[in-house]
Image (cartoon, rainbow, N blue to C red):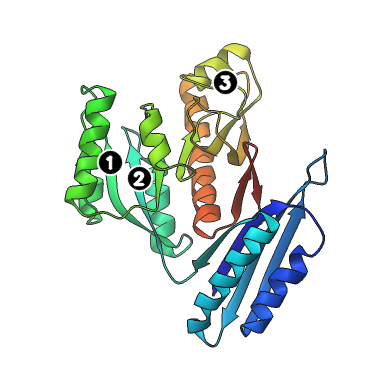
Amino acid sequence: MIVLTFSCPDKKGIVASVSKILFENDANIVESNQYSTNSGDKPHFFMRIVFEMESPQKLHNINEKLSEFSLAFNAEFKLSDTSVKKKAAVFVSKEDHCLYELLWQKSSGDLFFDIICIVSNHNILQPVAESYGIPFIYAPHRDNQEQQEKFIKKEFKRLNLEIDFVILAKYMRILSKNFVNSFRGKIINIHHSFLPSFPGSKPYEQAYQKGVKLVGATAHFVNEKLDDGPIIEQDIIRINHGDDISEIKRKGKIVEKLVIAKAVKFFTEDRILEHNNKTIIFE
């Protein structure tokens, strides 16, 4: 199966043009989703199509025709083969719950991707990586940001790793603008609050001080601003007046690991399109 995702300014003829390209190249559409913002002076159109082909060699023709389409409609498109696993680098610090959830869902078949390395500013989770046969890159937190990221990239190169995306599974370090730009739109972070509430450090402590009745978790793409990137997935869990901070954190971890796993699933299945610091997700 091949997944086609694209977006462009909304106008007549978009669906007809794309359908014609696929039909003329013997592609059979098995799933199709579309959405238009229909707001403001410049409505935007988004679409995700899954199709199958008896002649895979015609995919090159489809790609060429879609390139012509993109010029005519000012569109951005991407083609992905569902049989090819995306390769992820997972960044962690000390907490293991999100990492274990990703490993478990991967091994159970709920997530279809490869973890090709685990990166950490602590060596606490190195035994976990070794038990799964995954390369572990230890970049000590005592190093400054520039030294740390330079070392990580050097290790990527030394290990000959081809990384499609990065998962920050409770990685408690801020990435540099340079690192973020090198994986633009391909870094997924889990933040332990229901953003935009309680951004930054110690959100559970902030929630406790405010006496809120719900805490949540947010998976989002990373940009240059702290906890500001396009939101992919969120969920919440109830707390009460009797919960201390440790209990709030315990409950929050339950949500965190499920939210990050769902965000990774959306990404690996090419269900996410970005626009104006928001996401359109075809579930």
Q: Is residue 132 above or below residue 275?
A: below
Label number found at residue 119? 1
Could you tell me which secondary element the residue under label 3 belongs to?
A: loop
Identity of the residue drawn at 75% across and 66% down: 15
Could you tell me which secondary element the residue under label 1 belongs to?
A: strand
Identity of the residue drawn at 47% across and 28% down: 224
Is residue 160 visible in the rendered image? The answer is yes
Task: Write down the residue under mark 3.
Answer: 198
Label number found at residue 90? 2
Q: Amino acid at mark 3?
A: Phe
Q: Nearer the viewer, residue 84 or 251?
A: 84
Q: For label 3, count other residues whose C-alpha is less than 10 Å away and answer few (under 14), some (14-19) or many (20+).
A: some
Q: Amino acid at mark 2?
A: Val
Q: Is residue 222 above or below residue 102?
A: above
Q: Are marks 2 and 1 in contact (CB under 8 Å)?
A: yes
Residue 259 image position (x, y, % from top left): 54, 43
**Between marks 2 and 3, how big is the CA–CA gap?**
24 Å
Q: Residue furthest bottom?
A: 54
Location of the C terminus by quadrant is bottom right
**Between marks 1 and 3, how big is the CA–CA gap?**
26 Å
